[in-house]
Amino acid sequence: MVDNRSFRKVMGQFATGITVVSANYHREIIGMTVNAFMSVSLDPKLIAISIDENARMYKKLQETKAFGISILAEEQAELSKVFARQLDQGNRVIPFVQQADIPVINGSLATLSCEVNEKVVAGDHMIFIAEVTAINQNEGNPSIFYGGNYRKLSEILK
């Protein structure tokens, strides 16, 4: 039997980029940090995110039918902590912009606007499969999460 702590530790050995998933919800922009994100298909252009059933956006995301993904640049790691509720937003203004009528974070390494195509329950998570309707890309290095810590690609490559 594999215990939860060991499983989390082993899965932490897989380096991931850091994204913020955001959506318009009842005239408010909501967002959360998500690193369970992947490309699914090129034709049609599909991505998937996995959201824990206890996440604050779990039910809200099921209602919205569309969301944005902001792939954070290394200098945006602090934003990830705000959306993961590890850091208080304080007076910080989140630089959201609308891309195809969906909120994304300005200055991100890349942004995707997505429309939910399918939802699949997988254990204590729901996988949202969505079609990408708009994209934007900027230059820079990604924020990386590895071994339970935020990392900078620029430091690793030195």
Image: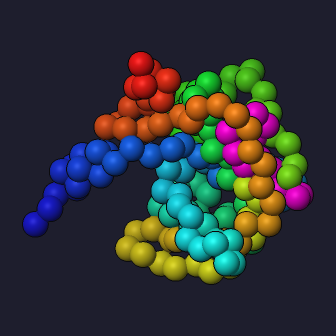
Front one among 117 and 23: 117
Q: Residue at x 54, y 50 (%)?
A: 34
Q: Residue furthest front?
A: 158
Quarter the C terminus occupies: top left
Q: Quadrant of residue 156?
A: top left
Task: Describe residue 51's horizontal placement relative to residue 108 as left or right.
Answer: left
Q: Is residue 123 above or below residue 4?
A: below
Does the magenta-highlighted stretch encompass residue 18?
no
Q: Quadrant of residue 66?
A: bottom right
Does the magenta-highlighted stretch encompass residue 108?
yes
Task: Describe residue 134's horizontal placement relative to residue 140 as left or right.
Answer: right
- Residue 97 rendering spot, x and y as whole percentages: 85, 43
Quarter the N terminus occupies: bottom left
Q: Residue at x 75, y 70 (%)?
A: 115
Task: Describe residue 144's horizontal placement relative to residue 98 as left or right.
Answer: left
Total marks in image = 0
Q: Residue at x 73, y 49 (%)?
A: 111
- Residue 117 rendering spot, x and y as whole percentages: 68, 79
Query: Colour scheme of this structure image?
Result: rainbow
> Could one spot residue 49 in this view of the protein?
yes
> Could one spot residue 85 in this view of the protein?
no
- Residue 127 rendering spot, x and y as whole percentages: 52, 71
Front one among 17 and 65: 17
Q: Residue at x 67, y 78 (%)?
A: 43
Q: Which residues are magenta?
A: 100-111
Task: Describe residue 90's horizontal placement relative to residue 145 as left or right.
Answer: right
Front one among 92 and 151: 151
Q: Quadrant of residue 125?
A: bottom left
